[in-house]
Amino acid sequence: MSLQEDFEKHAELVKTLTKKPSDQDLLILYGLYKQATVGPVNTDRPAFYSMKERAKWDSWKSYEAKSKEEAMGDYITKVKQLMESDTASS
């Protein structure tokens, strides 16, 4: 299985979690996913009153030094950690 296929598989697997990840984990997943699929941030930072969108943008920005492949690998690792945690708590 290629890295791209593994990434896409884990992007679907994360939707099957029975326990909602923490806000921090969701931001990590968002930032890594955007870096893996879009690349470095290509939009302006949202206004200060858009706190949720600003947090998501900041997370994405924090991964901008990672290559697409690194971001995919880190995303897969994070999903695996969440899946293990989800299974352990069930």
Image (cartoon, rainbow, N blue to C red):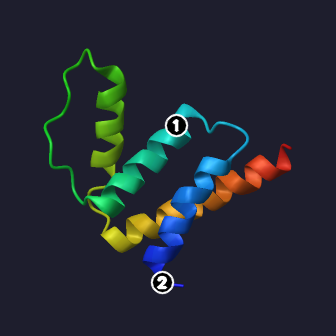
Q: Disc 2 marks which amino acid?
A: Ser
Q: Which residue is mark 1?
A: 24
Badge 1 local density, few (<14 within 10 Å), some, or many (20+)?
A: few
Residue at image position (13%, 37%) is: 44
The answer to whether the residues at label 2 and label 1 have Cβ atoms under 8 Å apart is: no
Q: Tell me if residue 60 comes above or below residue 68 in the rendering.
A: above
State the image coordinates of residue 65 (x, y, percent, origin top left).
27, 61
Disc 2/disc 1 C-alpha distance (Å) = 28 Å
- Quick check: 70 left or right of 21? left
Image quarter (top left, top right, bottom left or bottom right) of the C terminus: top right
Residue at 54% x, 85% y: name it: 1
Q: Is residue 41 above or below residue 3?
A: above
Q: Is residue 44 left or right of residue 35?
A: left
State the SS at label 2: loop
Total numbered circles: 2
- Depth check, front residue: 83 or 65: 83
> Mark 2 — residue?
2
| Numbered disc 1: secondary structure | helix
- 88 over 37 or under it: above or below: above
In this rendering, the answer to whether 63 lies above or below 43 is below
- Residue sitting at 66 percent across and 57 percent down? 81
Q: Amino acid at mark 1?
A: Gln
Mark 2 or 1, closer to the camera: 2
Residue density around tag 2, few if under 14, some if 14–19, many if 20 or more, within 10 Å: few
Earlier in the chain: of badge 2 and badge 1, it is 2
Query: Residue drawn 52% across and 58% down?
Result: 11
Please identify the quarter of the rendering in which residue 76 is found: bottom right
| Image-based side of 16 in relation to 61, left or right | right
**Apparent side of residue 80 relative to residue 65 in the rendered image (left or right):** right
Residue 7: give x, y in percent of width and height: 49, 68
Q: In the image, residue 62 lies at what x, y percent?
A: 32, 48
